[in-house]
Image (cartoon, rainbow, N blue to C red):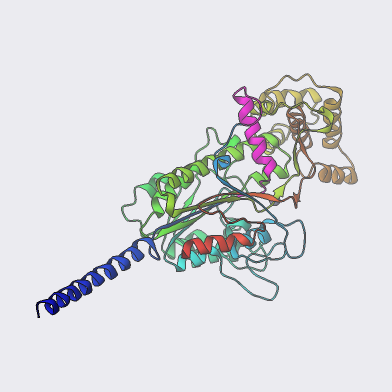
Amino acid sequence: MKFNYFIHICNAKTKVMKKYILVIVILLAIVGGANAQKYVFLFIGDGMGQADVDLYEAYLAEKEGKSGFVKSTISKFPFLSMCSTVCKDRRITDSGAAGSAIACGQKFNVGEIAYSETGEQPKSIAKVAKEKGLKVGIISTAPMNHATPASFYANQPTRKNYYQIGLQLSESNFDFFGGGGLLKQTGNKKDEKDLMTIYQEAGYLTFTSLKGISSLKSHNSKVIFTNETLERDASMPYFIDREGSAGNSLAEIVETATAYLDNPKGFFMMVEGGKIDYAAHDNDAGTVIGEMEDFDKAIEVAYNFYLQHKNETLIIITADHETGGVSLGIADNGYESDFGVLSKQKMSMSKFGTIIKKQTKNEESVSMKDYMDMASKYFMGIDMDFSSEEQALLNDAYAAVNAKSNRAKDEAKSKYNGNNPMAYAFCQIMNRRASVGFSTNAHTCAKVPIYAVGTTTPIYDNTEIFGVIKSFIEK
Ligand SMILES: [Zn+2]
């Protein structure tokens, strides 16, 4: 009898124990499983090939008087892949097809925004994250309805549908948009309702100051931040041109967004360094370096966040494609390089072109010396003692700006890719002094790097990024 009683007690205790264990297991599942915080940062350097990362690191080294490379934050990431960017109908892609491939995990044709020729409109990883309860932020130095950011919230047959893309921005209901402004804000004919008004009516709070966002007591509103100073194309000014102009760095925007979006379910944030591409299209190495610095410092904000939330954070850094065919070393200079000389460049080639245009507007004839003086004052920062090859570049450009016939004018336009020929030639001289080469003013199909922390899954194609992020969110 006593023995039976003992067994009964034991069974009862085991039952209670089992119940406790079950409760603990459930609690652990809740804390460590489906409801865990998930932080995802996806950084896209538009046009950023591996050579751009190398150029930035060689430049950092020369600034510090060191040989080789000095590690950027990007290079601190423990995991590296190389990834193909080819799109459906062309080997050399554009930001529409490439951004959409990254966002949706499938290939598209050039110019499509998450919208296939059959009319299929797949869901982006940002939308998947939003449905899972994560907050979503979309940040770019390019306009908010430009191809790369658009790929994450819109579905349009062409990237040129800026106004329609803009309408889909507020329909996404995403929590944070920040960076550049809007292209075709009132439509192609300027007769549509202002997109900003539409956003405000949809409940978005709109800001041109990050402080305004930081001081919000509740983080439940949806916000749109537009940089205080914008270029005529609605993008943020280049890093190299920002000094003295109102506005923020990409790092400051990411910092504010991170604090604003942080919540118990986590967030997904896409951050685009959108103008590495613009500068590479212009074959402007000094400006590429500035854009890389802006991008790298924004990545540093995310990396520091990762150090505080190691097991909950995934960061992927990649590019939609390479632009410019950048090379470190050029034929004319053999084995010589001096990337540090680019720190002397005072502004972007495009801004210098605008200055030349303004200053020569009412002049009947502008001499080579006038151009030299302008270059010395606004652009070069180096001695104006030019080699015969450099002088030849200037002479060609001088002939181009003075072209009289329509045919000669058209030739100049195509040769200098629509840039002011003199500004372009002075920029070419800076590139030559540094030994930075460009093989094209368009995109290339060179594979782009993937740097990551929080995953060790190799990524060989841009469509694979979607799955890596999705499985991390669902883990
Ligand atoms: Zn481009």
Q: In this rendering, is residue 323 above or below 381?
A: below
- Quarter of the picture containing the N terminus is bottom left
Please name the residue shown 57% across and 58% down the image.
185
Is residue 194 visible to us here? no
Please name the residue shown 71% across and 33% down the image.
356
Q: Which residues are magenta?
A: 44-69
x and y percent of residue 9 in the render? 14, 74
Q: In this rendering, is residue 398 above or below 261?
A: above
Is residue 120 visible to us here? yes
Depth order, front residue of 216/246? 216
x and y percent of residue 354 in the render? 68, 37
Depth order, front residue of 87/173? 87
Could you say which quadrant of the image residue 201 lies in? Answer: bottom left
Q: Decide whether residue 65 is among the magenta residues.
A: yes
Q: Decide whether residue 264 is among the magenta residues.
A: no
x and y percent of residue 443 in the render? 74, 50
